[in-house]
Amino acid sequence: MSISTTGVLARARPADRRPPRKARRVDLRRWISPVVLVAAWQLASATGVLPPDKLSSPWTVVQAGVEVARSGELGEAFAVSLGRVGAGFAIGAVIGVLLGIVSGLSRWGEVLVDPPVQMLRTLPFLGLIPLFILWFGIGEETKIVLVALGVAFPLYLNVHSGIRGADPNLVEASRALGFSRAERLWHVVIPGALPQALVGLRQSLGIAWLALIVGETVNADAGVGYLINNAREFLRTDVVVVGLVLYALLGLVTDALVRLLERKVLRWRTR
């Protein structure tokens, strides 16, 4: 009798050790402060405390958003801005990741690459706009280069830090197991650097949208920044807020996509 009970308990243990699944519930408390702020904004606009020439009411902003969406202006501006940030991000990501890998994997690479990158990183890249205008003119190149420069530095720093922060015990164990250098990089160093690299990806995407906002104020004839500047000329604060909200939504969406990528790629990490 005792033997059978022990066997049953032994078979039951693995199932008992599984953590219970918790149903994901939306925490509505996080919406309290945003709803209160919007309500206060609407109340201030309705009572005249906040004049419309300073800031339109939330309801007016919603109506303006529907208006520019139906006219097609919002869609065209969105497509142009997305193309600019996509091109700039691709260029900056390639440069940042490649320089981070070279500097992280090689001591000579760090000696040659890291000092100039660190010097350039300390420069306020938005202050380089006049120089970029002299070099590239006032066309698309200046906006794309500005985004690329903003993207490259966070990725470089995080990729370099992730590679240099690889667990030395795991690296030594892979050497003892007879892994070649390429196998150590693929199975130990790169997986160890991925969390830090994805942090850099999130940071660089945020800076990419910031750089685009500034870049599209430089003689732009299309894009969300052009939409905002054109609305400012006609004192359309409602359309200005629509453009800003679109920038914010694009930033939130790209950040959410990276977080989703983190959950997929880093499933091997213990929580």
Image (cartoon, rainbow, N blue to C red):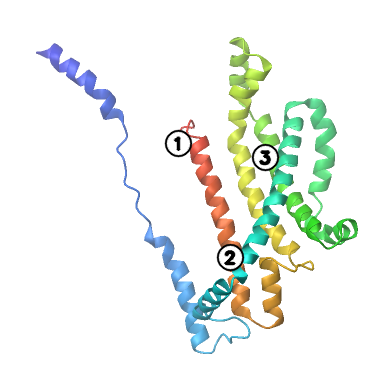
Q: Which mark is residue 108?
A: none
Residue 41's place in the image compared with 80, above or below, is: below
Amino acid type, label 2: Leu
Q: Residue furthest bottom?
A: 48
Image position, residue 170 (x, y; %):
58, 20
Q: Are marks 1 and 3 in contact (CB under 8 Å)?
A: no
- Furthest-front residue in this view: 71
Viewer-nearest of labels 1 and 2? 2
Identify the residue at horizontal 79%, vertical 68% (top origin): 219
Q: At which x and y percent is residue 250?
A: 58, 58
- Badge 3 crowding class, 10 Å Cα cut-off, few under 14, some 14 to 19, many 20 or more, is many
Neighbour class for label 2 at 10 Å: few (<14), some, many (≥20)? Answer: some
Write the residue at 61% across / 10% down. 176
Image position of 256 (left or right of 114): left
* Gap in angstroms between the C-alphas marked 3 and 2: 28 Å
Q: Position of residue 37 (x, y in %)?
A: 49, 73
Q: Nearer the N terminus, badge 1 or badge 3?
A: 3
Instruction: Provide the residue designation for mark 1.
Output: 271
* Closer-to-camera residue (208/78): 78
Q: Which residue is mark 2?
A: 246
Residue ID for mark 3? 158
The residue lying at 76 percent from left, 31 percent from top is 102
Amino acid type shown at disc 1? Arg
Report which quarter residue 210 is drawn in.
bottom right
Q: Amino acid at mark 3?
A: Asn
Q: Tag 1's secondary structure?
A: loop
Q: Report the Cα–Cα distance between label 1 and label 3.
A: 21 Å
